[in-house]
Image (spheres, coloured by chain):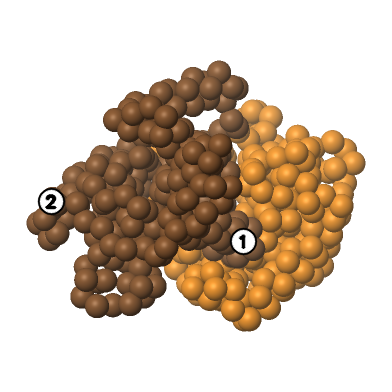
Amino acid sequence: MSELVQYLITGVGGGCAFALVGSGLVAIYRVTRVVNFAQGGFAVIAALTASTLLASGLPHGLAEGLAVAVGALTGLLVGLVAIGKPGTPPGAALIVTLGLGVFAYAVEVLVWGDQPRSFPGVPGAVEVFGARFQAHYLLIIGATLAVFAGMGLLFTRTDVGRALSACASNPYAAKVVGISVTRMGLVSFAIGGALGGLAGVLVTPIQLVTFDYDVTLIVGGLVRPALTLAGGLLLGVAQALVAGYGNAAYQMEVALVLMLAVMIWQAARKPIAQEEPA
Amino acid sequence: MSEPLLNVEGVYRSFGGVFAVRGVDLTVAPGELRGVIGPNGAGKSTLFNLIGGQLTADRGTITFAGDRLDRLPAHRRAHLGIAIVFQGARIFRGMTALENVMVGAHATTRTGFLRGTLRLPPHRREEREIRQRAREALGRVGLADWADRAAEALPLGQQRALQVARALCGRPRLLLLDEPAAGLRAAEREALAQLIEELKAGGLTMIKIEHDVAFVTRLADRVTVLDLGRVIAEGTPAEIRADPAVVAAYLGTAA
């Protein structure tokens, strides 16, 4: 029992990171129709930035905050290159993000070297139902919930959020009411960068930063935020259970099998309503 | 006549070598309701999209309240006060009717992304004001009871009314209506005609494209008739109905 609880909590913690990275991907995809292959890179860059800032003596909180801001800025830069020129077809922009992802990887290795890095998170351990786990997991789960709630407010209660939703729903009509679809696309890239960055900063204390943090494929096809949260958590928990009861070496296989299941399930359902052609 | 609000001069637009609009002039005075009619393929929709910014002209100029429009992207034109109601259901699916209308206020919002995201007091005030304005606009088009419904659940007539409300929420200076009565039932048409008359009484300048001569001549101050991409007649509804060139274009007889 206590083992199961422990795996569940560590799984949810890891799943939160997938959910954050994934919802950034979804935000970008919905607004711009671009599958952003550089999404995993935002998490890596923010995590590495945080490790450098902490090593140079910045206090916790400030260092992580700045690192998330760097993630957002990176997202904005990727967006500028990928969709900055109005009328760039999503397919071309996708290739650009793929190239930028590889380029970012090279830059990361140049700047930070190729050894995994980490930094400490919330110290101490917590015991629930006899299961002991690092207190940092509570921060991950709490921060993720807060960010998802905040995103909900942003999208329904602010003009920018409504403008983003409008671009996702009907870009043609969005232009007509005065929304710059390109600018909103850039905003979505910045949001995606910040969410990816937050994921990287949150999970690094519990697992080393590695350079193949590419979960973009796993949430591919999920275009609704609530589903992304659920999908991310499911993936995290499934991986923790397999690692706990089986063998940690199978984690990638778990992700692939889940991805396949999601794709089959999606294909079996009737297609969701398509946007009107522009 | 007072200073025109909209001035279209010598506008051309071709598609693959075929001119859809060739040398059209159109001058609309403030507060005027202008009807634009013509048979299929006359260039009405092209002209409409050239003014709205969905298309750019090959040649010619479009001036709106002193600003050159013809090179501006569509979203910048909205900021100058041009609103459009399309014939098709160009609504935002996945959002409620009220949210659809609130999006229409985008061009008039002042608080930026940061203040909006942090929900600072100026933003809260503005947000309340937009919500209020959107409710008023919904009430004006008779959709007050539909505010919290999903926009795509509305029948076609109401979806078009929703577009009108969305346009009004942006406080436009010129409203472009593309065959607003097309596909509507008699009662819906009547309600729409009444709404347009009210807006006109309120001083809003409008350009209305129609295929149906009877509907446009009933409401318009002046009517412009297009055929094969050219203006073939312009005048009051009575003049237009009596014009032999118009009759010929519609009936296909030699003028």
In terms of sequence position, does the residue under pointer 2 or pointer 1 come before the other? 2
Viewed as shown, does residue A242 lie left or right of B136?
A: left
Give the SS element for disc 1.
helix
View extreme (right): residue: B187
View extreme (bottom): residue: B122
Res A153 label: 1
Q: Amino acid at mark 2?
A: Asp
Q: Specify the chain shown as brown.
A: A
**Residue lying at 63% horizontally and 81% vertically, measured from the top left:** B121
**Residue lying at 24% horizontally and 47% vertically, measured from the top left:** A210
**Residue lying at 29% horizontally and 30% vertically, measured from the top left:** A249
Return the residue at label 2: A114
Q: Position of residue B7 (x, y in %)?
A: 53, 65
- Chain of residue at mark 2: A
Q: Which quarter of the rendered picture does the N terminus of chain A lie within?
A: top right
How far, Cα to Cα, is label 2 from label 1? 39 Å
